Image (cartoon, rainbow, N blue to C red):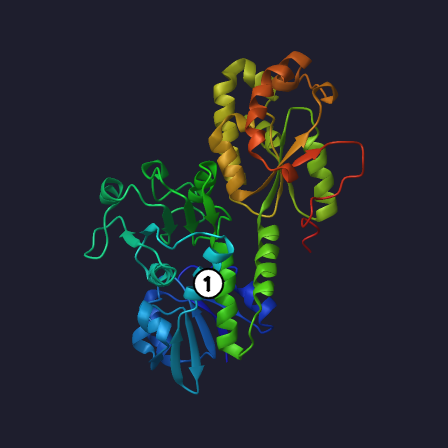
Amino acid sequence: MRRGLIGEHLGHSYSQRIHETLGGYPYELIEVALQDLDAWMKNKDFAALNVTIPYKKAVIPYLEELDERARRIGAVNTIVNDHGRLIGKNTDYYGCRFMLEQAGMEIQGRKVILLGNGGAAQAVQAVLEDLGAAAIVKVKRNPSPETLTYEEAYRDHSGAQVIVNTSPVGMFPAQEGIPVELDRFPQLESVADVIYNPHRTRLIVEAQKRGCRTATGLSMLTAQAAEAIEAFIGKPVAPESILRMTAELAREKMNLVLIGMPGCGKSTIARKLAEISGRPAVDIDQRIVERIGMPIRDFFAQQGEARFRQIEAEILAEVTLQTGQIIATGGGIVKDWENVRRLRQSGKVYFLDRSLDQLETDPSRPLSSSREARGSSMTSGLIYTGLPATNRLKTTAAPIRPPAGYGRTG
């Protein structure tokens, strides 16, 4: 019988890859419409299932048994068919605890803002309780007896040190969304988000900008799948395998982004890396030229830099919805924090560090038309100081190789 995941919209789920790699069995993504759930569950034509939005609570009436965690949490994300008896389990608990502990997030004695009130939120709340949170304040947009509104949280709980998001705000494809105003919590230390697509939500990127410790949802997804695999076939998955699978998925899904001064070789290196790795190369400036129908320098002269930057930002927003690419950016793209934020959400950013006297000039590009123009654009390089040393690559004449972990994808 079948093993797989049921939910409404599963087109971007990573679960099939995780289960087939770590579990070694066929695994399906099974989209079930709400009106079909009753017949589907009563038919019991499956060996084991994972359950995602919006059915983690809806499946409970069809189950003959719940394990201790599922009863405590009130939500099920794993079902085992034991000779016709459906047993519900909750592996989100293990996944969440793994995510927080691997990120080194301190929970004990902290006040935590928990965003959302669905099945994932119930599992996260149980973990936070067991890790010794001093207080857990549940927040959602639509008022309910057990939750506060966002305005109430801002007013009465601004001293919270930890935020955990379980709401869908910021999830692909609406990844411009952010569920909460971080500036309203001046004592904030850590932020976790159970969303795994995009790799970093806007919430996570903004938290990192503020110096917070962060945790993303990919490790939670992989860890909960690992515990589900044990429930499905009795095969335990070691923590080392969970971490390895998480890192492998991250490398595959993240974009590799090249930033740097005009003339430092971003476009050339992107093409070479694409040849080596098998990933598609995307040149933002080339996309802009295709859209505006003229050289960039002519567009600058006719409509000005402000209009150019607007088009650049629009194209970047479109490009960063895709994954697994090599992206070459324009030299001035980092002058706008929103552009930097989008790049960091979608992938890993590398600064191509080339000395000013070696930068090539290009009369068709306003910021690299002369040595003076390059010098005046050096202010954009200030944003690079936030990158770790491993993300600063000296450009030389040596053979080009992808950064570690970005080999051919198949």
**288 left or right of 93?**
right
Q: Tell which residue pokes out farthest to the right in this image.
A: 398
Q: Quadrant of the C terminus?
A: bottom right
Query: Between residues 119 and 71, which one lies in front from this camera angle?
Result: 71
Q: Position of residue 79 (x, y in %)?
A: 42, 75
Q: Is residue 6 above or below residue 332?
A: below
Q: Is residue 61 visible?
A: yes
Q: Is residue 303 above or below residue 320?
A: above
Residue displayed at 56% across by 70% down: 237
**Which residue in the structure is indicated by mark 1?**
95
**217 left or right of 58?**
right
Q: Position of residue 374 (x, y in %)?
A: 64, 17
Mark 1 lies on a secondary structure that is helix
Q: Position of residue 157 (x, y in %)?
A: 26, 44
Residue displayed at 35% across by 44% down: 179
Residue displayed at 34% across by 78% down: 63
Q: Is residue 375 above or below residue 383?
A: above
Query: Between residues 6 and 226, which one lies in front from this camera angle?
Result: 226
Residue displayed at 67% across by 53% down: 409
